[in-house]
Every structure is written in structure tokens, then in C-alpha cells.
Amino acid sequence: MQAHAASFRAALAVGTASALLPVFLLVGPAGAAAPAVGMPGALQEAFTAAAQRYHVPTDVLLAVSYIESRWDAHAGRPSVSGGYGPMHLTDLRTALAQSRPVADGRDDTARTPDPSRTAALAASLTGLPEDRIRLDPAANITGGAALLASDQETLGQPLTTDPADWYGAVARYSGSGTQAAAADFADEVFDVIRSGEVRTTDSGQRVALAALPAVASPTAQVRAPGLPTGHSGHTECPSSLRCTWIPAPYEQYGPEPTDYGNHDLAERPKDSSIDYIVIHSTESTWDAAIGLVKEPTYLGWHYTVRSSDGAVAQHLATKDVGWHAGNWYINAKAIGIEHEGFLADPDAWFTEAMYRSSARLVRYLAHRFRIPMDRQHIIGHDNVPGLTADTVAGMHTDPGPYWDWAHYFRLLGVPFHAAAGSGAGVVTIDPSYSRNGPALTGCVSRDEPCTAHGSSAMLLHTAPSESAPLVKDAGLHPDGRSTSDVNDTGARVSAGQQYVVAGRRGGWTAIWYLGRKAWLRDPRRRRVTLPARAMVATPRRGQASIPVYGGAFPKASIFPTGIPVPADTTLQYRLPAGQSYVVGDKVTGEYYHSTMYNTAQQTWIRGTTYYEIQFGQRLGFVRASDVTLHRLR
């Protein structure tokens, strides 16, 4: 690699700066400064100029950067794997000095840090200072182009204009430790080249990659780096996804038959349908999460997705019931997928690699188990209701307001879209993630404002005014008001969720929410809602209000003798007459009785028909006997 560094330095012949300039500059031909990256279109120009300088196809450079960062610079902050800038050039030492936790990548699925993938090598190839490589987006792009060209030369491949000739170099750029991992990365890059992308970055730059649908992916090139092949073990994953088996223990750890963990054996979907996929964030590092899922006295979930490279570990067979959602009804009907990271630190943890691996896994599972791909079946942990009134306040809030649901559903292949004409009685929440930045607090410490950031979430007010109080959630705040805390779901809606319109005034739309009218800012020229049509439920005539339940358990009278009736799932909310809520599904009540380390005593109890509804930020259930249905357009 040193020979390559010398040849690239000679070809570039640019000077170095002693300090980072106040504005980010693009190093143009002969070292001239191009427009500041903060200027409209300058980031696009940076990609074009860097690609030309190193004879890398612009489409390849743009697509690699998109997979690495979605073209974001994150204001110079490193990712969890120590990567900086749009090209994710690594500098682990500096990232650690900045107190950024860094993934150690100890298992064979890791995207192992490699000296050829560091900001230092990019600086050596370009002649630019390392601090500029890390912090100046244009310099970072220049360094990424130099690395790609160096990889192409190392593989003995010509610097052609055909993107297909660069598949092996792209795989090598990933720094992956196995052929399967390298091929995964290259496949994602080439998928982006074929589909194209347009996006406004976190710095407000509009960047576009035109679609080239005919570009091939010559996968044989990935063998050239000489990486070991990957293997999947006992996993249930799509063939295109790297997946390893790291089992969660099903074992008795104490003298009592109830002393067992950390999941229940079952035969789903033979004995019960799987209706939900629950998206979690671990609120811990990969190593910590893997340590916990191996602990029989803790909780078990089905899959974990790693932040740095999207690697997937499976812990439970999908047929078995994990303990992950905090709601026994949802657990019995769901698959749980944890994502490494912290909900209040999305730039470091919620990577494109993780989004894409997770989406591939969810597409596979949804198809296999016939789970509808909508926001009432593909749900966050923050959409799971408390099962009983006394559990509502303690429900988890991950993956939180910074999870990009609209992007995730585009990756699933079912983007949110208008399904009715203007003035429809139902709306789908769909704010622009990059432009929507609710003023949240508590990301670092209580009441401290969070750093401004794009979000899938919107706050709801009691009147059509930003100064009006937030709507109250009686379950979370029986004696007070909802807050803008990052973990407070009491007055919040998220992209993809659907609600019935309760009124419109000026640039505001009211929806029925938790039994009351709630207002969200919805300007005519920048709508955050899409017109929709849906089946909705409203209380039967003659009823002033009806109960809302946290799970769809059968009525007590249905339970056979000898099986204890579970706690009442009636919540502290009521659905008043005259209000309607979008129906996600019609379900038969089920209760999975499994309380001992003895599968012979397990049984499923069924009866009582419910409708699942979008009641607040979380789901709710109403009995079919309490409501009438009608379709709103």
C-alpha cells in the first residue's frame, strides 16, 4: 500500500493546511478551493471533482458514501465504529479520545477495523491533513475516492468508467472480515446505483444519484480479496443476509419450576399466528446486549442487528416466544428485533448498514409469516401498549423519535403514500425527516435541550398553537402534563401511523388521540400528513364510552378450570362516543399459558373478538362487541 500512497501523492501534488478552515472547502484541481460545502450544490460538486481526480465513477463514489452515511457528515462527530464524514473514514484513536464508544468487532462477522480503512491512509494518499480528512466533508470525499482507486489498483483492475468493474474494490472498501460481509456491502452499494437516490443531507445539501438500472453486480470479484467465507449456522434469515447463531438459553436456573429463562418454547405459526415484528434499540453496545441475551435470568429476543456493519445474530427460533416487548399478548404474537444503539444518539448508532440489514430481515419475515408491512404490524417498542393499567407508565420508549420510519419503510419496499384525495377523513403521518425537528429535551440530562436533529416524530397540542400545552396522557401523567422529553410518548405521533381527522384550522390538523382532540402543525405548503383511507372503529350507538385494552385476552369465562385468569387488561383510557380510530386488524383473543419449565403444561386459550386500533402513540385493543366499523375515505 505504501507504493500506492506515493504514486497518489505524486499525482495529486496538493498542499496541506495547518488548521481546519472556518468553512469546509473542496480541494479542486491543482489544489484550488472550490465553493464552500455549505453552499447549495457544493457537496454534489465535491463528489464529482473527487471522482474525476481519482478516475472513480461518480456513481460508485456517491453510492458508497450513501451506504456509509447517507451523505451526512454528522457535524464531524464519529460513528460508533470510529468513522468520520460522508465516506466514513475511520480514526479509532481520535474517536476514543473523544469518548465515543467504539465497537470492537471480535467475532468473525465483524467489519474489522483495517489499517487500509483509516483516515490516516486517506491522508497519506491525498496529502491532506488528517484533521481535514475527518472534519471537512469535501476532503473526506476526496480521501474516500483515493481509497477506492487504491483498492482498484491493488486488485489489478483498471480505473474504468464502468461501475460494474468496481464491484471488487467496493467490497474491499467495506473493510469486512468475510467474503459474505464484503459481498453484502457491495450488493447494497450496487442496489443504490441501480435504484438511484435523492436526499437532503444533515447540513441542508441536496445530493442526487441518478438510477442506472442496467448496472451488473459481478459477484465473482469479491473472491479477489481472499477473505474467508461466512456461514449462517441454524439461522432463519434471507440468503443474502449475513446471520450467525448466538443462542439464548432455555434452561432452569433455580429450584422452582418457575425459575427458568429466558423465553418460552412454542410451535408458531402452527399453534398461533405471528402478527407483529417489534423494532427495538438495545440502549447498550453490541457486546453488552449479546451478554444479556445469553443470560438465562434475563430476557430473550429473536435477533440483534449490529450498528457498525449490519451484521445479524439470531438468538431464538421464530417459532418460540421471546420475552422482549413488556406485554405478554404482544410477546406471544411477535418477533423481536433489537438494534444496537441508543435512541438519543442516532448519528452514531442508527447507521445505513443497520437500517438495510434490518429491512432485509423484516421483509423476509413478513413475507414468510404473512405479516402486513404497515405501522400497526411493524411497530416500535414505543408503540407497544402497557398490558395492564399499572404497567403503562413503565413501558419502554425505543427506538424513539429519531428512528427514521419513512426511510425504513422505503427500504421495506412499501413507502408511505397518499391513498385518498385532499380532505380525506384519515391521515398518515409523514413529516420530512430532515426538516422536521421537534424541540425535544433530555437526550443528555433531564430538561436539557437535545441537539437539533431530524425526526420521525411530531408533538401534539391541545389547541392549534405552538404555545398551547401538549395533550395529556392519563396513563403516563395522571397528575401532570406530557413533556417534550425524548422518552415521553404521551403527546407524540410518528411517521406511518394513521389517525382519524377531528378538525382542521389554518395550518393545523386535529386528530382523535387517546380519547381527545389533538392538534399538529400541518402547513398547507409543507404538509406533514398524507390523505388516507381506512377502516375505523367507533363506539356502538347508545354507549357514552367504551374501555380500551392493553392486550386481546379472552374473557375470564372462557378460561378452563385450573388455569389462572391473567390480570385485567383494561387500561385507564376510554374511547368516547363520536370518536373514531383506525383499525389495524381483527383478532381473536388469545392467551398463551406457559409459566413453568415444563412444556407439557403449556396451552393456548382462545376466544373473544377484538379490533386492534391506533389509539395514541401506542396501540390499543377494543372488543368487537363494543364498536361499529365503517370505512373513511
Image (cartoon, rainbow, N blue to C red):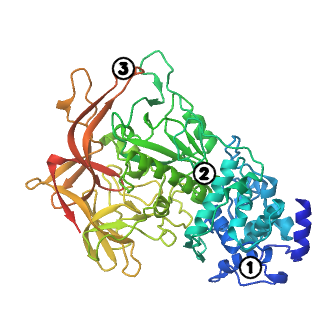
Which disc number belongs to residue 600?
Answer: 3
Q: Position of residue 398 (x, y in %)?
A: 47, 50
Does 587 sit left or right of 229 as displayed?
A: left
Look at the picture and state if 301 lies above or below 124. above
Quarter occupied by the N terminus: bottom right
**Amino acid at dot 3:** Ala
Question: Which numbered disc, 3 or 1, marks the residue that appears first in the sequence?
Answer: 1
Gap between marks 1 and 2, in whole Å? 30 Å
Which disc number belongs to residue 70?
Answer: none
Gap between marks 3 and 2, in whole Å? 38 Å
**Amino acid at dot 2:** Gly
**Amino acid at dot 1:** Ala
Q: Nearer the viewer, residue 168 or 149?
A: 168
Q: Circle 1 — which element?
A: helix
Report crowding for label 2: few under 14, some 14 to 19, many 20 or more residues within 10 A (C-alpha).
many
Question: Which numbered disc, 1 or 2, marks the residue that appears first in the sequence?
Answer: 1
Question: Which numbered disc, 3 or 2, marks the residue that appears first in the sequence?
Answer: 2
Does 193 sit left or right of 401 as displayed?
A: right
Q: Circle 3 — which element?
A: helix
- Determine the residue positioned at 38% across, 35% down: 268
Examine the image and state in which quarter residue 257 appears: top left
Report crowding for label 1: few under 14, some 14 to 19, many 20 or more residues within 10 A (C-alpha).
many
- Determine the residue positioned at 32% across, 49% down: 475
Check disc 2 and report the residue beneath it.
310
Gap between marks 3 and 1, in whole Å? 68 Å
Check disc 1 and report the residue beneath it.
49
Can residue 82 be seen at all in this image of the molecule?
Answer: no
Report crowding for label 3: few under 14, some 14 to 19, many 20 or more residues within 10 A (C-alpha).
few
- Determine the residue positioned at 37% across, 48% down: 370
